[in-house]
Image (cartoon, coloured by chain):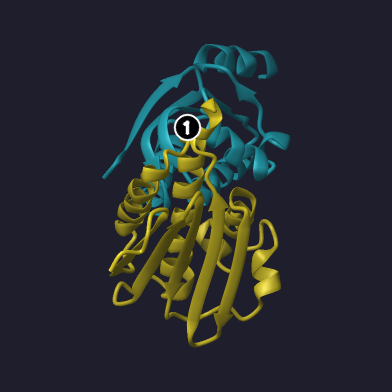
Amino acid sequence: MNLHVEMEHHRGILIVRLSGELDHHTADMVRMQMDEAIQRRQSEHLVLSLKDLQFMDSSGLGVILGRYKLIKNKGGKMVVCDVNSPVYRLLEMSGLFKIMPIYENEGTALSGLEVVS
Amino acid sequence: MNEGTGTNFMNLQFAAKSENESFARVTVAAFISQLDPTMDELSDLKTVISEAVTNSIIHGYNNNSEGVVSIQAEIREDMITIIVEDRGEGIEDLELAKQPLYTSKPELERSGMGFTIMENFMDEFEVSSEPGRGTSIKMKKRIESKKALYN
């Protein structure tokens, strides 16, 4: 499968780095892996790093929105970072930036979350 | 038979399986590459192909991989026309389906953005659908060739 999920846990914050292509075919796998990690590690907040994501379509938007709802319902915050220009346009078109902060990189995303929490 | 310069076409048919989504968008992108599109244009085209094919698989065929999805792409000068078709369930209410964020399958965590993305990324976008017969999406886009940018 042309998608790789890398995860790291850092003081209640789950950092998820996606590389490859996030479409309908790979969406279920990403969804399951993220939900399992959020559950098992009792993550409060989520940082989604999209630096090496080469392709995303509306199936990916569905995955992001679904995780946003999950984290928000548990009282946490979700942010995205390192977004390339095609993915940025999709997120903008879907109105995602109205509900979710975007940061330049993981460092600024983590400090952003630590300020609000 | 010589179609003349500036005209070209391709036809593609494949099983309605999600693993073919990547195959479909990469193949169409490779065909369009002869127009020397920018990275953004290529990425837009890959996205709309992915949206249309995903719709056919999930909504047209309800994930039944016996279904067949077909794509026709045509180049005329700097204009690309793409038709994505299925012979699946069809869409009952097209106007509703085109509403941003509307999805008929919220349980699958669909974003409901497929048609909105196709409308935004392409210059022309047209859906025709008949319940029980299938759906056909026709899209056009003018490619601002990189070569033209230098002139």
Label 1: element kind: helix
* Residue A47 can be seen in this image: no
**Vertical position of residue B10 compared to residue B35: above or below:** below
Residue shown at 48%/71% (left/top)? Answer: B59
Q: Position of residue B29 (x, y in %)?
A: 38, 47
Q: Position of residue B96 (x, y in %)?
A: 69, 70
Residue at 42% of width from left, 75% of height from top?
Answer: B86
Identify the chain drawn in cyan: A
Note whether B133 is above or below B139 in the view shown.
Answer: below
**Rendering quarter of residue B84:** bottom left
Residue at image coords 37%, 43%: B33
Determine which residue is flagged by label 1: B147
Question: Residue A88's quadrant in the figure?
Answer: top right
Residue farthest to the bottom, as pictured: B132
Q: Position of residue A15 (x, y in %)?
A: 46, 25
Chain label for disc 1? B
Chain B: drawing colour: yellow
Front residue of B36/A12: it is B36
Q: Residues within 10 Å of mark 1 (few under 14, many from 20)?
A: few
Q: Quadrant of the C terminus of chain A?
A: top right
Disc 1 marks a residue whose amino acid type is Lys
Task: Give left or right: position of B82 versus A3.
Answer: right
| Residue B60 coordinates in the image, percent (x, y) | 46, 74
